[in-house]
Image (spheres, rainbow, N blue to C red):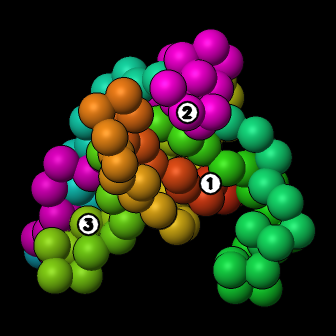
Amino acid sequence: MNEVSSMIDEFGKDVTLRRQSGSGSIVDYEFNAAATADTIIKMFIHPASGKDLLILPEGERTKTVMIGYCYDPVYLASKSDQKNSDRIVDGSTIYEIKNIQFYEAQNLSIQPYYRCTLVEVNS
């Protein structure tokens, strides 16, 4: 088992993964937001470093930024599917996923995992 897997297993906590389950629509000139589906996943979350902040646009660098590690697939916004990025709900704080890196297992003793940049949502 590698270090990240042990961090997820030992220090990870249950958080809510909020995923848009469809695309929004416009009916009678009014936008109807897409439905969302919530799932509980295990994620290890810690504060982002200065290096992690550099990959974000300037306007988001002033928000709370965290790094999360999990085994469950997470997704970014998709224009073709008309879906927003997944969100992570940790207690009363909501984060939007802004960057994802997938680490594939190099051998059978290491479980593949995702490393994602989480930016606090202002709503």
Residue located beneath label 1 in the image: 118
Q: Position of residue 88 (x, y in %)?
A: 51, 41
Which mark is in front, 3 or 2? 2
Q: Which callout, 2 or 1, points at the residue further toward the start of the chain? A: 2
Callout 2–callout 1 Cβ contact below 8 Å: no
Quarter where residue 72 is shown: top left
Q: Is residue 37 magenta?
A: no
**Identity of the residue drawn at 76% across and 39% down:** 46
Which mark is in front, 2 or 1? 2
Residue located beneath label 3 in the image: 83
Q: Position of residue 71 (x, y in %)?
A: 39, 35
C-alpha span from label 1 to label 3: 17 Å
C-alpha span from label 2 to label 1: 23 Å
Residue 5 seen in the current view? yes
C-alpha span from label 3 to label 2: 33 Å
Q: Is residue 5 above or below residue 116?
A: above
Q: Is residue 108 above or below residue 106?
A: above
- Residue range corresponding to the magenta coloring: 1-27
The outermost residue toward the bottom is: 58
**Identity of the residue drawn at 53% across and 52% down:** 115
Of 62 and 8, nearer the camera is 8
Crowd rating for badge 3 (residues with CA inside 10 Å; few <14, some 14–19, many 20+): some
Callout 1–callout 3 Cβ contact below 8 Å: no
Type of the residue with mark 2? Asn
Quarter where residue 11 is shown: top right
Q: Tell me the element at label 3.
A: loop
Residue located beneath label 2 in the image: 2
**Identity of the residue drawn at 40% across and 34% down:** 110
Type of the residue with mark 3? Lys
- Residue 78 is left or right of residue 4, and the answer is left
Q: Tell me the element at label 1.
A: strand
